[in-house]
Amino acid sequence: MPSIILVTGATGYIASLLIPKLLERGYQVRALARQPERLKARAWFKQVEMVQGDVTDPASLAPALMGIHAAYYLIHNMASGHGYTSIELEGARNFASAAEQAGVEHIIYLGGLADPEQHIAPHMRSRIETGMTLRQGPVPVTEFRAGVIVGSGSISFEMIRFMTELFPIVPGPAWLKNKSNPIASQNVVDYLLAALTNPNGRGRVFEIGMKDTFTYQELMKRYAELRGHKRVFVLIPFIPIWFMAFGIDLMTPVQRRIAYALVGGLSSDSIVLHDEARETFPEVRLMEYEPAVAEAMRRLHPLKIERVWEDGSSGVKFLKHEGFFIEHREKRVDVNEEAIAATLSALGYEQAGEGLYLQKLPSRFGEAWVEWRASNSRLEQTAYFAPRGMGGFLFWWLSFPFRALKLKTLLDGLAKKAVVQ
């Protein structure tokens, strides 16, 4: 019988990459989330056993850990705001205790890359102390410490992407000169998978990252070059963290509370000082920075991103996600799929899946698509726009009233034609 693997933090970025890989390898997967309904749109949702729970609620952990061979601890609480560090440690204590009681054989934890002997931000200190707390229990822990994760959907990469796309002259704090060993998201997952079957990593801490070391400014500059942009950097000392977090929340997909913690974490070097991971896990082949960015760019398509807006809630939704501005609407109707197909075909849309229609629109300022999804009870419309440079951002913001009116009119008109007679 295949081993049962628990993945905590199932709504998070790394979990969304890890779970499909575990399923491909034949593992039975149980996923723990505070709001499992947010995952219903994921392609793998019906293949996993979903459990509702929270590591700060010890009573919810026993059913999640029952019969588990190994557990991935992929949880952080930066979005909780003030006091999140104590919440993280409480959750780790609860999980370590529950794992011991359940007879779990192995915990695999993804933390943050920083030198604990130096002065580091609370976010990075909390990541390291969470690992220490998990290791205080008797269950063997494999801890990986990663810095900037390069991949479409990673909060650190999305911050680099949106800020570099937006500003021809990039303002930034002096610590843009700090150093980092980034790592491709694919390689993070490679290490997490390798730890399951490679016994040499149990009970140890590994710093993981690319061979090359970059400053944060260099990471942004190289991204710009790959996108065909020229960027000038102006370093401004003493920018308040709260001010940077506000700007990042406004311009990028990263929420203000997460940005506040994340920006603080970037105020020190994040480099690999101890390189045992490469010797212990030789099966992992590390990608370089440019290929990792290129892979993220290849995912800049509506059919290749996670549909995080399909979270069970209704209403009009505006979000920034995986390089896109996204505008989503839906109407409840008794759908006549033949009428929808005929109408959309006449408008130039192509069928991209069952009940799914997609059209790429011409744009000088970026890449744009409009998508329709039809089901028995609703009609969904999603507009995607990947801005190119400052012109793309201005185009999206300034065209909002006209775009919103046009998209709503299209939705209302198609809904009338779609109603079953």
Image (cartoon, helix red, strand yellow):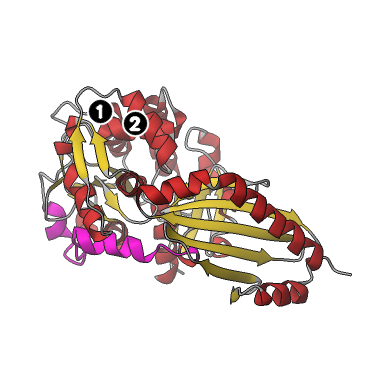
* Few, some or many residues within 10 Å of mark 2 (<14, 14–19, 20+): many
Q: Position of residue 214 (x, y in %)?
A: 14, 48
Q: Which of 341/34 is in front?
A: 341
Check the picture and name the quadrant holding the C terminus: bottom right
Q: Which residue lies at the image location 19% right of the left edge and 52% below the top edge? A: 209
Please determine whether, in this image, residue 242 is positioned above or below residue 12: above
Who's the residue at 61% across and 71% down the image? 357
What residue is shown with label 1?
121
Image quadrant in which you'd find residue 26: bottom left
Q: Secondary structure at mark 2?
A: helix
Q: Residue visible at 36% across and 47% down?
A: 390
Q: Is residue 162 above or below residue 83?
A: below
**Residue that mark 2 sits on:** 261
Check whether the beta carbons of the residues at disc 2 and disc 1 lie within 8 A of each other.
yes
x%, y% of residue 55? 47, 37
**Residue type at the position of mark 2:** Ala
SS label for mark 1: loop
Above-or-below relation of 131 to 347:
above
Residue 419 position, x and y percent, is 83, 65
Where residue 162 appears, as percent x and y from the top left, is 36, 47
In the picture, measured across the screen, residue 239 lies left or right of residue 343, that is: left
Write down the quadrant of residue 24 in the picture: bottom left
Bounds of the magenta span?
A: 276-302
